[in-house]
Image (cartoon, coloured by chain):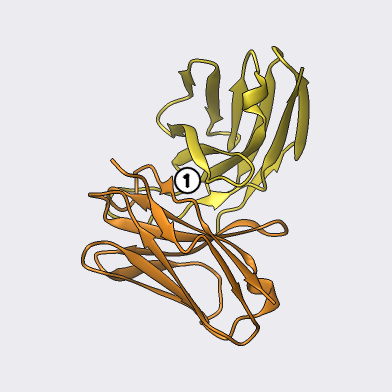
Chain colours: A yellow, B orange
Amino acid sequence: GENVEQHPSTLSVQEGDSAVIKCTYSDSASNYFPWYKQELGKRPQLIIDIRSNVGEKKDQRIAVTLNKTAKHFSLHITETQPEDSAVYFCAASRSITGTASKLTFGTGTRLQVTL
Amino acid sequence: KAGVTQTPRYLIKTRGQQVTLSCSPISGHRSVSWYQQTPGQGLQFLFEYFSETQRNKGNFPGRFSGRQFSNSRSEMNVSTLELGDSALYLCASSLERGGDTQYFGPGTRLTVL
């Protein structure tokens, strides 16, 4: 089955700096890669996702890049703010409309943005 | 639209008991998936329901089961609880099966004593 590795497990950056979280996946058939942000005691919330027909996607300060050949995707957060502090999870799935949609998650990255 | 809701939010049970958790998906969403979140194992897929049928199952023992009703609401049941079942149980709904974003509920925090 699919296996997703995520690094680093913890990341501390100063406010205003950039943060990068990296994930690798094992199943070359995976084609959907969402990123979730989970604040303490709250539900995981989707912040951005990318499908395998796209190499990069950006939404304001957040961007995700995908390298299908290397089976690698990354989350980039620019101009970090204290409210970005949370645990971030990457996930992968072999997602085809009308078929099973099972997300395999990475182990999470705890991001701490310091003042 | 209201988000995914889960009840109860917190549960305390003892070993050997059974528990039923409930999930109401976003209105119009037909697929419901369940995940277990623990500090040691992270987020792990339990099962997916669509059109009242279990379509996909993760690597969990048969003590974990679920069902989906005609209104897409879903329940999961854990029988003969073990200490290791203590976790946050999250459900996620999506519009259809596959290819769609999954939106998570707030979870049910289960503690087994």
| Disc 1 residue crowd, few under 14, some 14–19, many 20+, Cα 10 Å | many
Name the residue beneath numbered marker 1: A30
| Helix, strand or loop under label 1 | loop
Task: Quarter of the image for the C terminus of chain B: give it.
Answer: bottom right
**Looking at the picture, which amino acid does disc 1 mark?**
Ser
Task: Tell whether B82 sits left or right of B63.
Answer: right
- Name the foreground residue: B25 vs B97: B25
Residue B92: image location, x then y, percent? 42, 53
Vertical placement of residue A10 versus B75, above or below: above
Q: Residue at x 65, y 18 (%)?
A: A81
User: The numbered mark 1 sits on a residue in which chain?
Assistant: A
User: How many discs appear?
Assistant: 1
Where's residue A96, x and y in %? 33, 48
**Residue at the image point whose x is 67% and y is 30% from the top:** A85
Classify residue B6 as left or right of residue B9.
left
x, y percentage for residue B96? 27, 50
Closer to the camera in the image, B108 or A76: B108
The quarter of the picture where the N terminus of chain B appears is: top left
Residue under the image location 51 percent in, 67 percent down: B58
Note whether residue A34 is visible. Answer: no
Q: Quadrant of residue A74?
A: top right
